[in-house]
Image (tube, rainbow, N blue to C red):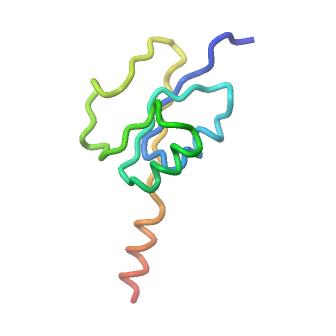
Amino acid sequence: MRAEPFTFYEFFAGGGMARAGLGRGWRCLFANDFDPRKAAVYRDNWGDEDLRVGDVWGLTTADLPRSDAPDSRVRSGAAACAPPVAALRASSS
């Protein structure tokens, strides 16, 4: 059995559903979302120890925690679903 959990970064985190799906065998080192409302949901679900609110384009490698573990290779990033849907609706009107 592993003593240490696998680690990951969660970009465009929203409410942290990738984190929820990965479960307890994983530890989030960094989460990001630009939307303050989504970040509030993330905080309610997971706290804000690893959360950074802001545009991902403003991040640099210095903003990301280092993980030297050889199995720390997961970087999750999901496209936001609401804005494209809203744009599609607006363009079809």
Residues 84 and 30: in front is 30
Q: Residue at x 44, y 16 (%)?
A: 67
Residue 73, percent across and down?
Answer: 49, 24
Is 8 placed above or below 56 here? Answer: above
Is 17 placed above or below 37 here? Answer: above
Is 89 placed above or below 53 here? Answer: below
The part of the image, by quadrant, that contains residue 88 is bottom left
Q: Residue at x 44, y 56 (%)?
A: 37
Residue 27, percent across and down?
Answer: 57, 25
Is 75 placed above or below 15 here? Answer: above
**Which residue lies most toward the right here?**
1
Residue 54, percent across and down?
Answer: 31, 45
70 lies left or right of 83: right
Query: Considering the image in quadrants, where does the C terminus appear?
Result: bottom left
Residue 83, percent across and down?
Answer: 41, 66
**Which residue lies most toward the bottom here?**
93
Q: Residue at x 40, y 85 (%)?
A: 92
Residues 56 and 73: in front is 56
Query: Considering the image in quadrants, where does the N terminus appear?
Result: top right
Report the label total: 0
Residues 82 and 42: in front is 42
Q: Residue at x 47, y 53 (%)?
A: 38
